[in-house]
Structures are given as C-alpha cells and as structure tokens.
Amino acid sequence: MPTDKLTLSVDSQAVAKGKRYAAASGRSLSSLVGDYLNSLDEVRSLGGLPPLIQELIGMGVGAGDAHADEKDDYRRHLEEKYL
C-alpha cells in the first residue's frame, strides 16, 4: 500500500508512550497510527466501540456451550428422579 508522509503535533508524553508501546510490540509508531486511522471506519460501523472492545467481540463465543452437557445431564437426573 502506498504511504504518505504526515507531520503531527502531539503531546510529547503521548509520543514517548507511543514509542515505548511500539518498541515493546515490535512495530513502528507510524504503523500504530496508520492502523488506528484505518480502524476509524470500522469503529463507526460497530456503533463506536473502541478497538480493544472490537478485539474482544466473539472471544466468548461457544463458552455457553461448555455447560450445555451439564444442563442436559442435570435435566435427565431430575426426570429420572421425579418422573
């Protein structure tokens, strides 16, 4: 993807935090900012959810199914006991 050069005026503490975060995650500050800007349309389409929440969406899918067998076993137990 082609890139454009962009000059921003950002609080120096925010820049320092961004650089530390980028270094810790093995990415460049430019890539972090670019990914954030690219995610803005996605945030709007998901009702304004922050990127962190977007990442969490779907992580619990199937978690309710883990107890389905237990519920079925308990239902059978009650049927055997009372019917």
Image: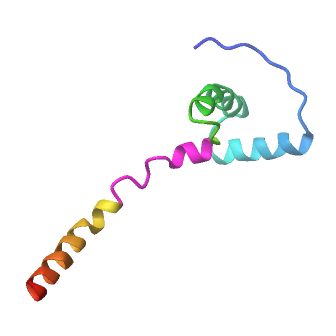
Task: State the residue at coordinates (53%, 45%).
Answer: 55
- What residue span does the magenta drawing correspond to? 51-63
77 shown above or below 72: below
Q: Is residue 8 magenta?
A: no
47 shown above or below 7: below
Q: Quadrant of residue 15?
A: top right
Count all numbered tags in the image, as a single digit.
0
In the image shown, does 22 or 72 lie closer to the viewer?
72
Place of residue 67 in the rendered image (x, y in percent of width and height, measured from the top left): 29, 68
Place of residue 64 in the rendered image (x, y in percent of width and height, measured from the top left): 34, 61
Q: Is 43 placed left or right of 4 in the picture?
A: left
Task: State the residue at coordinates (25%, 66%).
Answer: 68
**Which quadrant of the rendered structure holds the N terminus?**
top right
Place of residue 27 in the rendered image (x, y in percent of width and height, measured from the top left): 64, 37
Task: State the residue at coordinates (16%, 83%).
Answer: 78
Residue placed farthest to the bottom in the image? 81
Instruction: State the colouring used for the structure image.
Output: rainbow
Q: Is 52 placed left or right of 79 in the picture?
A: right
In the image shown, does 8 or 58 lie closer to the viewer?
58
Q: Is 16 placed left or right of 41 in the picture?
A: right
In the image shown, does 20 or 11 lie closer to the viewer?
11
In the image shown, does 40 or 45 lie closer to the viewer?
45
Q: Quadrant of residue 49?
A: top right
2 shown above or below 11: above
Place of residue 16 in the rendered image (x, y in percent of width and height, measured from the top left): 84, 44
**Which quadrant of the rendered structure holds the C terminus?**
bottom left
Q: Is 44 placed left or right of 15 in the picture?
A: left
